[in-house]
Image (cartoon, rainbow, N blue to C red):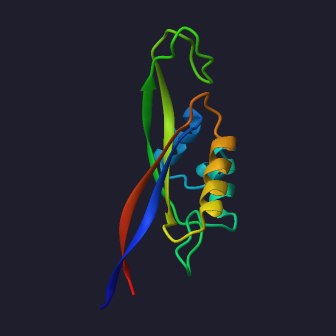
Amino acid sequence: MNTANKRALRVAVHVPVAAETLAALLAGDRGAVEADTVMAKMLAILRAPGALGDFGVYHGVAEIGLGWETFAPAPDARPTLGAAGQIEHSPTVTLVSWIPAEAPAEAIDTALAALMAAHPWEVPVIEVTETRLLVRS
């Protein structure tokens, strides 16, 4: 088997979901991710034609991780969840996808801007890191 290392950008988006969505996903209800309003927006961006999640013969490729995030909004914050000055816990899905390193800069910027625009948090958490993928060649 021949393999190759391909450079890529790893994009991890921390997406708040309803507690009911997280509970349904943890119980094995795969459809719950499609029914959640915020996740539906993020998945639509991921599945749209473009660089995000493009693996050649596979499109819209992503990993979906389930969990919780915690934070304490500063007094001058306008949090989507919770109240300023109080510790909060948010049911969260981490949506991880990849962008080929050879994608045009405009395509990369378009994908990241779409994720930022759709994210409901005052300060979205979107990680972008360089990585290498081991793929069959």
- Name the quarter where the C terminus is drawn: bottom left
Name the one closer to the observer, 77 or 25. Answer: 77
Residue reaching furthest left? 1
Q: Position of residue 61 (x, y in %)?
A: 53, 66
Q: Quadrant of residue 134?
A: bottom left
Direction from residue 61 to residue 135 in the image, left or right? left
Residue at x 52%, y 71% (from the top left corner) = 102
| Residue 39 is at least partly visible in this image | no
Horizontal and vertical percent position of residue 22: 52, 40
**Is residue 74 found left or right of 4 in the rendered image?**
right
User: How far from the left and from the top, in percent, is residue 108?
Assistant: 59, 59
Q: In the rendered image, is residue 75 in sight?
A: yes
**For residue 82, what is the image quadrant?**
top right
Q: How many marks?
A: 0
Quadrant location of the N terminus? Answer: bottom left
Question: Residue at left 57%, top 41%?
Answer: 21
Percent position (x, y) of residue 122?
A: 61, 27
Q: Looking at the picture, does residue 82 appear above or below residue 22?
A: above
